Amino acid sequence: MNLVYNPQGATLPPNQQMLEADYKRELKEHFNIEFNQLFALTNMPIQRFGAVLLAKNEFHPYMDLLKDNYDAHNLKDVMCRSTISVNWLGELFDCDFNQQLQIPVPNKSRRHLKDLLTQNLEGDDIAIADHCYGCTAGQGSSCGGALENDQTKVV
């Protein structure tokens, strides 16, 4: 069993490894619950969370937080570099978040799963927007949790 942690509100998640150790200790001690891994994910400023940020007048400060904590080292491991997202119609997106926002892959000749039978994705451009800072800020964030595994890094 794996757990997923999202911070409450407009903050970056704490260090994933330290948080996992705390959760393992506390859940074992108080509830006799054991789990394999904890994945710490950054809240993306889109859809429902984006609407909440706008309603609380926190959208721009949160975007500033993400931009101020951008770490170029995370670019090598973001999911859009090795994973595609496919909706129920077979349409292609560079990531789940682009799919939610209906931002298609940039290559106009390849927009459907069937196109991958005859075309290679390697080297193609990736559609990016401001929400992409969520995957690159601090320790980084992807489907598998934090991208940065350095325990000494504090966000």
Image: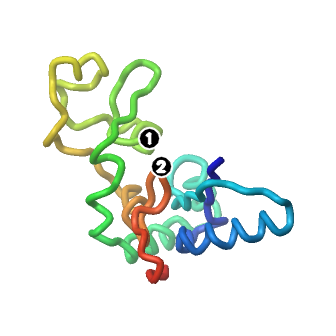
Q: Residue at x 61, y 71 (%)?
A: 19
Identify the mark nearer the N-term, 2 or 1.
1
Q: Residues within 10 Å of mark 1 (few under 14, many from 20)?
A: some
Q: Count every numbered label the image shows and give the total.
A: 2
Q: Helix, strand or loop at disc 1?
A: helix
Q: Residues within 10 Å of mark 2 (few under 14, many from 20)?
A: some
Q: Helix, strand or loop at disc 2?
A: loop
Residue identifier under label 1 = 96
* Image position of 92 with respect to 38: above or below: above
Residue identifier under label 2 = 143
Q: Residue at x 82, y 69 (%)?
A: 29
Instruction: Give me the disc on residue 78.
Output: none
* Mark 2 or mark 1, whichever is nearer to me: 2
* Image position of 70 with respect to 103: above or below: below
**On the picture, is 120 further left or further right than 132?**
left
**On the picture, is 93 further left or further right than 65?**
left
Most extreme residue toward the right, as rendered?
30
Dividing the picture into quadrants, the one containing residue 53 is bottom right
Q: CA distance from mark 2 to mark 1?
A: 9 Å
Q: Are marks 2 and 1 in contact (CB under 8 Å)?
A: yes
In the rendered image, residue 98, in percent from the top left (x then y), is placed at 39, 42
Q: How is the image coloured?
A: rainbow
Q: Residue at x 70, y 67 (%)?
A: 23
**On the picture, is 60 further left or further right than 111?**
right
In the rendered image, residue 31, in percent from the top left (x then y), is placed at 85, 61
**On the picture, is 85 further left or further right than 155?**
left
Q: Nearer the viewer, residue 8 or 51?
A: 8
**Amino acid of disc 2:** Cys
In the rendered image, residue 135, in percent from the top left (x then y), is placed at 40, 59
**Amino acid of disc 1:** Asp
Dividing the picture into quadrants, the one containing residue 141 is bottom left
Q: Residue at x 16, y 18 (%)?
A: 118
